């Protein structure tokens, strides 16, 4: 099957865009021909470069929704752009068009373009919280526009978690074309963990017994990195030997640095910029701490599970991810029951084994690709 993967082009490093790369590899491994269509904006260069060994890459003069001052309104009204994009896609003669959207209002012109081609297609939507829930400016208007566009396009809409699918049904009404297909993740070879852990800990100047609590993500408000610092301070007060590491960059870098300096956290908190290989940092850690305000199905959590790390999660996310429970994760709440778990290396090891087994049983690349392949064929 010849599959055109169309990116709404929000960036190269967000999990919602990296997902396209992972899906493409898995589909290619199953014998499909995959092509990436993306904006010519420089922020997409990195993702496109990584995609090139998998299949053709088409770049287009496309403006992402959030580069428009009027956001989804401009995207929705971009009829001439949609016609141009439809022509670009039709020229590739795909059997199927798969659009990757970050949220409800993102890429509405791409939905219209796909409809104009007449080619079977679907759209994956990673975040299904509406503009009102996200406290966006002019939320009623933006929600009306997104609802109108999503209702007008009649092909399947795929969410990355059942909770997200329920959100979409609440937004659009109960519809059989709404599906849930979880993201996939590389299944790490845990036989490599001991050597990688020793090497990375030496690089970080940590001995083998130090409790290392890590996070991977962009330093942006949605990920709440400053909450990570608050929790690091709280956990360190109970477990003075603990060390904390954030891997990633973003707009809150200067505020992060200022808070670390102001509260004198530098003795046990550090951050690194974006890393091309996060696996070894995960292998070096003992716990993965995730503090985001909201998510789709974050690749960072799935990668942590794959690395055999128990995930320490704030209550707002635990409620949305039923696959995380007391057998594989730690609830970081107000009762501080977490402190005894973090201090118990045997318990952490047990949780880590269960976490890896969860990744193997539910979140492999091939399982994700097989589910999409079945929906492609059903749609065609």
Image: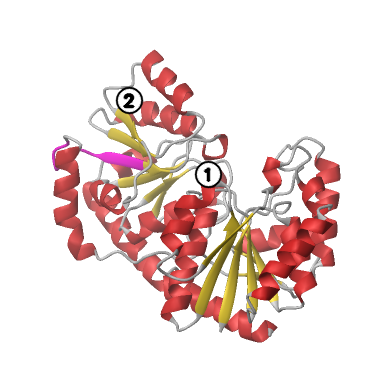
Quarter of the view holding residue 80: bottom right
Q: Is residue 88 shown left or right of residue 29?
A: right
Q: Is residue 135 magenta?
A: no
Q: Is residue 213 magenta?
A: yes
Q: Which sits earlier in the primary sequence, circle 2 or circle 1?
A: 2
Q: Is residue 294 shown left or right of residue 80?
A: left
Q: CA distance from mark 2 to mark 1?
A: 21 Å
Q: Residue at x 30, y 64 (%)?
A: 188
Q: Residue at x 69, y 62 (%)?
A: 166
Work out whether residue 310 can be spotted: yes
Q: Residue 112's x, y, as percent?
A: 78, 64
Q: Is residue 95 above or below residue 152?
A: below
104 or 18: nearer the viewer: 18
Q: Is residue 236 shown left or right of residue 147?
A: left
On the rendered image, what quadrant is the C terminus found in? bottom right
Q: Is residue 267 above or below residue 144?
A: above
360 or 184: nearer the viewer: 184
> In the drawing, what numbered circle is on residue 315?
1
Q: Residue 251's x, y, as percent?
A: 51, 31
Quarter of the view holding residue 178: bottom right
- Magenta range: 206-214
Mark 2 is surrounded, within 10 Å at the Cα level, by few (under 14), some (14 to 19) or many (20 or more) other residues, namely few
Look at mark 2 in the image and give the residue it sits on: 237
């Amino acid at each position: 099957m010849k599959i055109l993967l169309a990116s709404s082009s929000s960036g190269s490093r967000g999990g919602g865009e990296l997902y396209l790369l992972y899906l493409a590899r898995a589909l290619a491994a199953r014998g499909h021909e995959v092509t990436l269509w993306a904006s010519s904006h420089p922020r997409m260069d990195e993702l496109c470069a990584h995609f090139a060994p998998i299949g053709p890459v088409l770049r287009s003069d496309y403006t992402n929704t959030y580069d428009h001052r009027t956001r989804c309104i401009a995207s929705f009204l971009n009829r001439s752009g949609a016609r141009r994009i439809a022509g670009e896609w039709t020229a590739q003669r795909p059997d199927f068009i798969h659009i990757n959207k970050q949220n409800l209002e993102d890429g509405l012109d791409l939905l219209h373009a796909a409809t104009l081609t007449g080619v079977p297609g679907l759209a994956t939507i990673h975040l299904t919280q509406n503009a009102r829930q996200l406290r966006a400016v002019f939320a009623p208007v933006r929600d009306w526009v997104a609802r109108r566009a999503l209702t007008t396009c009649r092909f399947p809409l795929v969410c990355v978690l059942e909770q997200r699918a329920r959100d979409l049904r609440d937004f659009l009404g109960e519809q059989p074309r709404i599906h849930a297909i979880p993201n996939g993740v590389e299944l790490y070879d845990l036989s490599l963990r001991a050597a990688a852990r020793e090497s990375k800990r030496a690089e970080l100047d940590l001995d083998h017994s130090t409790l290392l609590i890590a996070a991977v993500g962009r330093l942006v408000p949605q990920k709440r990195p400053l909450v990570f610092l608050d929790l690091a301070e709280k956990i360190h007060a109970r477990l003075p030997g603990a060390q904390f590491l954030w891997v990633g960059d973003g707009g809150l870098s200067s505020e992060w640095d200022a808070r670390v300096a102001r509260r004198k956290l530098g003795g046990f908190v550090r951050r690194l910029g974006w890393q091309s290989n996060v696996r070894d940092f995960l292998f070096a850690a003992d716990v993965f701490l995730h503090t985001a305000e909201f998510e789709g199905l974050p690749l960072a959590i799935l990668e942590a599970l794959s690395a055999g790390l128990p995930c320490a999660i704030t209550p707002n996310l635990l409620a949305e991810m039923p696959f995380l429970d007391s057998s594989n994760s730690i609830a970081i709440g107000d009762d501080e029951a977490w402190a005894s778990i973090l201090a118990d290396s045997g318990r952490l090891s047990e949780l880590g084994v269960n976490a890896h087994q969860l990744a193997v049983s539910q979140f492999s690349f091939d399982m994700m690709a097989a589910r999409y392949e079945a929906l492609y064929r059903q749609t065609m």
